[in-house]
Amino acid sequence: MAEPAETMDERAASSAPSRQRWKCVCAYDGAAFAGWQSQVGGTAVQDVIERRLAAIFGTLVRVHASGRTDAGVHARGQVFHFDAAWRHGPEKLAAALRSELSRSVQIRSVRAVPSSFHARFGATGKTYVYHLHVGDPDPFTRPYVWALQRAPDLGAMRAAARALEGRHDFAAFSAFNGTERETTVRTLRRLQIVARGKRIRITAEADGFLYKMVRSLVGALVAAGEGKLGVETIVRLLAEGRRTAVVQTAPPQGLFLEKVAYGRRAASGDPHTESRVRRRTRETRE
């Protein structure tokens, strides 16, 4: 006896693409947005990307980023992921995302990843870059630097950076925002200062950053360069673990999220990645 023919609904279901997790890397000009995290007025980077995804897929698609950036902070290598069924491959998905997207946002790459990949909980480190400028910058530079009136003492800044590098409790160099954390201990792998002409570039690399930690570190380095903050005071602040008015927060426009790092297990979709990293509280907003 012949088997019954497939119905149209059955054939459509069998040919429908399966749900897939997509990892995306994007860049954005933070001056155009109220930070990364979705806002009531829809003025955040997340809102812009989710609106574009909704137009593509015809439904709400939530994105999950490696961390939140504050208003005015930029990114060259922010990572986010989302789940959606797409049949045409990553290149065409990237092209669809880029189409009609705000000119202040660039989708740099899109690729399929295992469902166990998580943009936030799988991250093993981040690199931020902060730009300083000595004197009055030109109109094309001004929106992306902190302009200093006088040249700071680079030797004093580098001495302060050496004191800050390593594994410390960085509570004195963060701004508490009302959320509870298990630990404020982080490993600052690199705090590098490079000067070229009137430009000073500060690179901070760590296993994770506390709320406004990078901008606080930059504020401390500038204060050290201006003779307002000595190495002894920095060491004492680290030991006391208490935020004081001695540490200033650098303005947001000079800060760029440069890169997010993922270990081999996270990149390959290790099913234990999320549960392992969730045990560590990692406030990644800057």
Image (cartoon, rainbow, N blue to C red):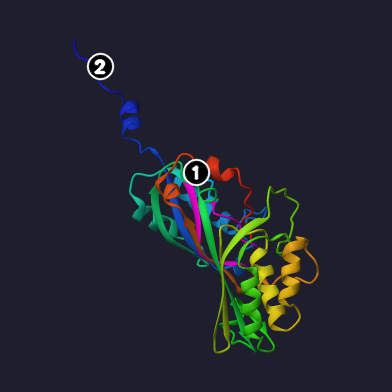
Question: Residue 68: which numbered mark, if any?
Answer: none
Q: Secondary structure at mark 2?
A: loop
Q: Residue furthest top?
A: 1
Asked whether residue 248 appears in the rendered view, the answer is no
The span picked out in magenta is 65-82
Locate the N terminus by quadrant. Answer: top left
Q: Secondary structure at mark 1?
A: helix
Q: State the residue at coordinates (66%, 86%).
A: 153
Q: Are marks 2 and 1 in contact (CB under 8 Å)?
A: no
**Badge 2 is on which residue?**
4
Mark 1: few/some/many CA within 10 Å (<14, 14-19, 20+): some
**Badge 1 is on which residue?**
273
Q: Horizontal and vertical percent for residue 152?
A: 66, 86
Whether residue 234 sits left or right of residue 12 in the image: it is right
Identified by mark 1, the residue type is: Thr
Q: Residue furthest left?
A: 1
Q: Is residue 7 magenta?
A: no
Whether residue 15 sits left or right of residue 23 in the image: it is left
Rounded to the nearest angstrom, the CA distance separating label 2 from label 1 is 46 Å
- Using the rendered view, name the quadrant where residue 225 is placed: bottom right
Compared with residue 94, is residue 272 higher up or lower down, i.e. above or below? above
Viewer-closest of 25 and 265 = 265
Viewer-closest of 106 and 115 = 115
Identified by mark 2, the residue type is: Pro
Number of marks drawn: 2
Q: Horizontal and vertical percent for residue 144?
A: 59, 76
